Image (cartoon, rainbow, N blue to C red):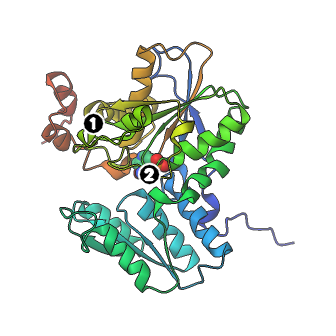
Amino acid sequence: MEQKINAYNNILQLVGNTPLVEIKKITKNIEGNFYAKVEAFNPGHSTKDRIALHIIEEAERKGILKPGDTIVETTSGNTGFSLAMVSIIKGYECILAVSSKSSKDKIDMLRAMGAKVYVCPAHVSADDPRSYYQVARRLHEEVKGSVYINQYFNDLNTDAHYRSTGPEIWEQTNGQITHLVACSGTGGTISGTARYLKEQNPNIKIIGIDAYGSVLKKYHETGELDPDEIYPYRIEGLGKNLIPTATDFDIIDQFVKVTDEDSAHTAREISKTEGLFVGYTSGAAMQGIKQLAEEGVFDKNSNVVVIFPDHGSRYMSKIYSDDWMRQQGFFDAKNMEEAQKIEYIK
Ligand code: PMP
């Protein structure tokens, strides 16, 4: 008799169900037990696969999307990559309006995944018709049967994590999780995951990681969007200069702000100590844990789950480039030696 071939139908079946990995070395001087939800195990190497698949499948279910239709979004980052990937498998066109600030590598990556990319001038206001927001809106209006993902203002973003990331963490920890630490950009990851976890156990503490240069932490504490909080920073995917409706601020107990420099070094430290090659915001989340530990937030009974959103390979020309680190002024005399360890055999 013929043996059945043990294969997935396509890579979309591999979205979600990412592993939880105990992290011991980087946390050795901190009380508590720490576990990383390693989202780079998604087929598109980031947590955004979950929202791309969920939002597109909901649009199909509602009859909004038919084969050959078009997905529109404004992103050069992980969401764009995930949307392009899902579009290939499901047979949609994918249009991404990105800012001219996006690196060539990123644009090439999206094009490698078959997306049509519009590069829009970075230094125009959001209501300028050339801005990537307006270009995406216009394309969405012009292209019949298109869906605008609009991840910062789409409840389905949060819902994707309520349905997948939350239940996975609850099961993987056998309900013993005490703290969730997650970066907040759109806020979809933290809000959806937290909503599920707090329904199971309202005592679980939810801690959001924000960047210096972003309005989220102050807004959470005061209800005020303070323009003085806004200034440029390097970490991509974390923090914001507006208030996304995908974030449920009420469900988040506390925000912690981290610097570009500390987050970059901590990401490199995770790679070196845990063998987990992670992205910039994973470093930010781990840096947040270090700062919280100094405030005495954790004790030996704490079971802390931290979300590592994406893979280090996306940051080769940033935090994993010694030249870039030097240009940012992130190397001091001590770690400069570390940077120069390559030995060239002549
Ligand atoms: N890390 C990275 C690398 C991201 O791309 C994002 C998404 N903007 C986040 C963290 C934050 O996730 P969320 O948008 O769900 O808050």
Vertical placement of 43 versus 260: above or below?
Answer: below
Image spot of residue 3 (x, y percent): 80, 68
The residue nearer to you, when weighing 263 against 105, is 263
User: Disc 2 marks which amino acid?
Assistant: Pro
| 188 with respect to 116 (left or right) | right
Question: In the orientation shown, which residue stands out farthest toward the right?
Answer: 1
Q: Which percent across, then down, holds residue 1?
A: 87, 72
The mark that comes first in sequence, 2 or 1, is 2
Q: Which residue is mark 2?
A: 244
Residue 283 shows in this picture: no
Q: Is mark 2 within 8 Å of ligand 1?
A: yes
Q: Residue at x 68, y 65 (%)?
A: 7
- 22 up-or-down from 156: above or below: above
Disc 2 or disc 1, which is closer to the eye? 2
Q: Position of residue 257 (x, y in %)?
A: 35, 31
Instruction: Mark 1 and ligand 1: say if the CB distance to the nearest ligand atom is below 8 Å.
Output: no
Q: Quadrant of residue 109?
A: bottom left
Q: Is residue 165 visible?
A: yes
Reading the image, the residue beneath label 1 is 260
Q: Dot 1 lies on which element? A: helix
Q: Is residue 21 above or below residue 243?
A: above
x then y, percent, for residue 223: 42, 38
